[in-house]
Amino acid sequence: MTLSAQSMTQAEGGVEPIVELEHVSIYYGESRAVQDVSMAVRPNTVTALIGASGCGKTTLLRSLNRMHDLTKGARVEGRVLFEGQDIYDRSVDPVAVRRVIGMVFQKPNPFPTMTVYDNVVAGLKLAGRQRRGRLDEVVERSLRQAALWDEVKDRLHSPATGLSGGQQQRLCIARSLAVDPAVLLMDEPTSALDPQATARIEELLAELKKDVTIVIVTHNMQQAGRVSDWTAFMHLGELVEQGPTDQIFTRPQMELTERYISGHFG
Amino acid sequence: MTGSLLGGHGRARRRRRRVTDMVATAMIVLAALIVMTPLVLVLVYLVGRGIGSIDLAFFTQLPAPAGESGGGVAQAVVGTLELLALASVIGLVIGIGTGVFVAEYPGHPLVPTVRLLSDALIGVPAIVMGIVAYALLVVPLRHFNGLSGGVSLGLIMIPYVVRATDEVMRLVPDVVREAGFALGLPRWRVIVQIVIPSAASGIVTGAMLAMARVAGEAAPLLFTAFGNQYWNFDPLKPVAALPLVIYTYSISPYDSWHRIASAASLVLVVFVLLTTLLTRFVFARRTR
């Protein structure tokens, strides 16, 4: 929690990067999936990682909250700094990292045995603290932030699996927000959703970035253009080009970027 | 390939296909019927022979001496439940624990060995488990006892419970685990509070089936629980069991005892059937 509190103060400053990658390479066994990526993520912005399938953008995203620790054979080199502290340092507990840097996945993955309410508070309750009254507040706040409150307020105690796909994904966003993260990683959060549900989540991002910093992987270039402030284009595991989104989309410096965003491959 | 997709084949070939289809269908239907036959025959036979001996006294009274009418096998009904309770404590605690371990720690160097040995254990004859329990608990105590019977049945249960737990836990999608980790939950909480509840119905089904599997075992009990004609609630003394009643009464020369053996068999078969059906019924709906 102290990490999170710090992040809030720095976020208000709005200058220092909240997350920095220094020469990050990621391996699965012998094969290298991401090669020497360096970039900075500024607080209260949306950063989009774009690129063709298999270019390493999801792999890179998962290195930002140590999800690779769970994958056998995966190895991360280089440094990932959160507010100046290397999250891969031996003194750092990966569980604490994930508490501050949350993640939303490609497919909605609510906990199947839990109600809507229990899903939202899972991170708080399973961590074994918080009183009931406080939990109720958190549930309402998180669901409102995820623009889901009005749709589910009358069925908080019914199974989460009864919601539609788009609602489930917003529930997963609410669940991540409930633990009050400083950074939210989103791995193609709308790829399993229909256009309307996608539009709702895109609208949501603009609101959310007032409170959290967002890094989003997306296949959809229009989406990257609409929602992000900063765009990084990856190709075959390398970061080809990064910059302010409008610049990447209107005046890319590299020919490869130009060809990708104009739809010549990918 | 000649002709169109639908009508291009010769009439002879079409007929041959239809015949092949009919023959194959008939054969698999026959196989399915053969599978059901033994159970139906056993039930018909046992109901015919045994149902007449099943009354309230069967479940409430001790055995009457040979030649006397009346009496029951109450001590064996209760004894079987006692043995199953003992067996479950051992079989479920060790079995579920091991199953969780092999399913949730796939990278651990011990896992392949544990999984292999556990599967091999399924093939070990029940009577051998009885010998193990005999060596562990009967020899040191110098007399037969119910505890050793429960242990032998528990040992038989373990590999079934391990396999069932392992399989259903691995059915829980990894994305569900990742969701837990991404919330900053430590691994043990993800396992205990997210994965196990998601797999609970399957684990319970596996546990019930393992109990049903050992409920009818006689061989390992012959020289462990031993059987008892009287009430005994001390697990360190010999304990009665329905399979032992079936065995002893079947090899006796008295026709009245033979009928009781059939009745006891019927009770066991119905118990196992009900357990199986009940778990199917209850959890088929919940897992969807």
Image (cartoon, coloured by chain):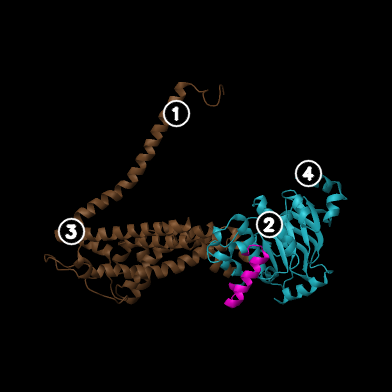
**Distance from Cα at disc 2 to Cα at disc 4:** 25 Å
Q: Quadrant of the N terminus of chain B?
A: top right
Amino acid type assigned to the residue bearing label 4 in the image: Gly
| Res. B17 mark | 1
Q: Which chain is cyan?
A: A
Q: Is residue A142 magenta?
A: yes
Coordinates of residue A127 in the picture (x, y in percent): 60, 73
Q: Chain of mark 3?
A: B
- Residue mark closest to the camera, 2 vs 4: 2
Label 3 CA crowd tier, 10 Å (few <14, some 14–19, many 20+):
few
Q: Which chain is brown?
A: B
Q: Residue at x 22, y 63 (%)?
A: B248
Q: Chain of mark 2?
A: A
Judging depth in this view, the residue of B24 and A146 nearest the camera is A146
> In the figure, A225 relative to B95: above or below?
above
Magenta-colored segment: predominant secondary structure: helix
Q: Chain of mark 1?
A: B
Q: Looking at the picture, do discs 2 and 3 lie on one chain?
A: no
The reply to whether dot 4 and dot 1 touch (C-beta < 8 Å) is no
**Distance from Cα at disc 2 to Cα at disc 1:** 54 Å
Q: Looking at the picture, do discs 2 and 1 lie on one chain?
A: no
As helix, strand or loop, the secondary structure at mark 1 comes to helix
Asked where in the image residue B268 lies, by quadrant, the reply is bottom left
Asked where in the image residue B85 lies, by quadrant, the reply is bottom left
As helix, strand or loop, the secondary structure at mark 2 comes to helix
